[in-house]
Image: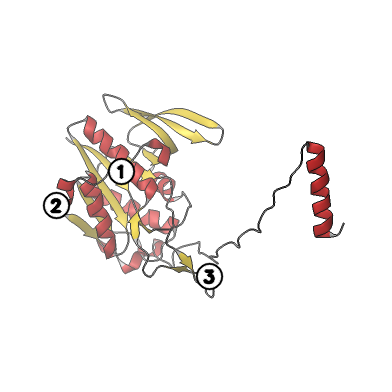
Amino acid sequence: MAFKVLVCAKQVPDTNEIKINPETGTLIRDGVPSILNPDDANALEEALKIKDKFDDVHVTVITMGPPQAEEMLFECIAMGADEGILISDRAVGGSDTWATSNAITAAIKKYGDFDMIFAGRQAIDGDTAQVGPQIAEKMDLPQVTYVQKFEISDDRKKVTVERQLEDGYEVIEIALPCMLTAIKELNTPRYMSISGIYNQNKDIKVWNAADIQVDLSTVGLKASPTNVFRSFTPKPKGKGIMLDGDSEKDLAKNLLIHLKQKHVI
């Protein structure tokens, strides 16, 4: 029986190209290219490294989004994944993290048995870091977030990870199945292979809300308990100044003079 690894991924707008509508405060998405979410690329790469190590590993990438998200799944397959699953339905459109995790959890249950799940720490278009942990809670799975180092045992019964902290890291051993969320320090994602790009003979499964049998009262915009009140671009900070002085005393004197001139102390 194959060792099955699921990777939760998302197609996101390239935030380097995003602009804010000054009148509405909303993102201008027209003409903005979509990419595989960076942290999800790290999650996929770690799953592919397991596939490189063992001969019987099957990697499935699952995502939720509009029909064009299929392009991202083909990219993942070109990197080495075995198949892709796209949840696409107007009924799930506008879902926040809670509603999104409901839909993806339903899809995972439809998928069936698996050995572990990888996800990116967070998506660059939301930065909430909530969907992975929410899926783990709803699947009743042990989880470790912010994984910066990963090692799987030879018998594939457990994994040992380093979890990044602000002032260091934790070493955690966790039994399978489990949920792990990846950060960029975990690895360097591989490129798509030439053969993977030109030999796309693997199907993408497209499931709607009925296929995954999700409760429609738990998905979509109306079911989402959170919403974005306003998006805006912070105003640029004022130009700084450089103070000259041969000693700390001179610098302090010059700073005081500058503050008096600026604020009329």
Tag 3: residue type? Gly
The residue identified by callout 3 is 25
Q: Is residue 116 above or below residue 195?
A: above
Q: Position of residue 207 (x, y in %)?
A: 24, 59
Q: Which mark is residue 44?
A: 1
Instruction: Using the numbered discs, state the Cα–Cα distance from disc 1 to disc 3 in whole angstroms.
Output: 33 Å
Instruction: Using the numbered discs, state the Cα–Cα distance from disc 2 to disc 3 in whole angstroms.
Output: 41 Å
Badge 2: residue crowd in 10 Å (few <14, some 14–19, many ≥20): few
Q: Secondary structure at mark 2?
A: helix
Tag 1: residue type? Leu
The residue identified by callout 2 is 198
Q: Residue at x 60, y 60 (%)?
A: 236
Quadrant containing the C terminus in the rendered view: bottom right
Q: Position of residue 103 (x, y in %)?
A: 35, 57
Badge 3: residue crowd in 10 Å (few <14, some 14–19, many ≥20): some
Instruction: Using the numbered discs, state the Cα–Cα distance from disc 1 to disc 2 in whole angstroms.
Output: 20 Å
Comes first in the chain, label 1 or label 2: 1
Quadrant containing the N terminus in the rendered view: top left
Q: Position of residue 14 (x, y in %)?
A: 39, 58
Verify CB contact (< 8 Å) between mark 1 and mark 2.
Answer: no
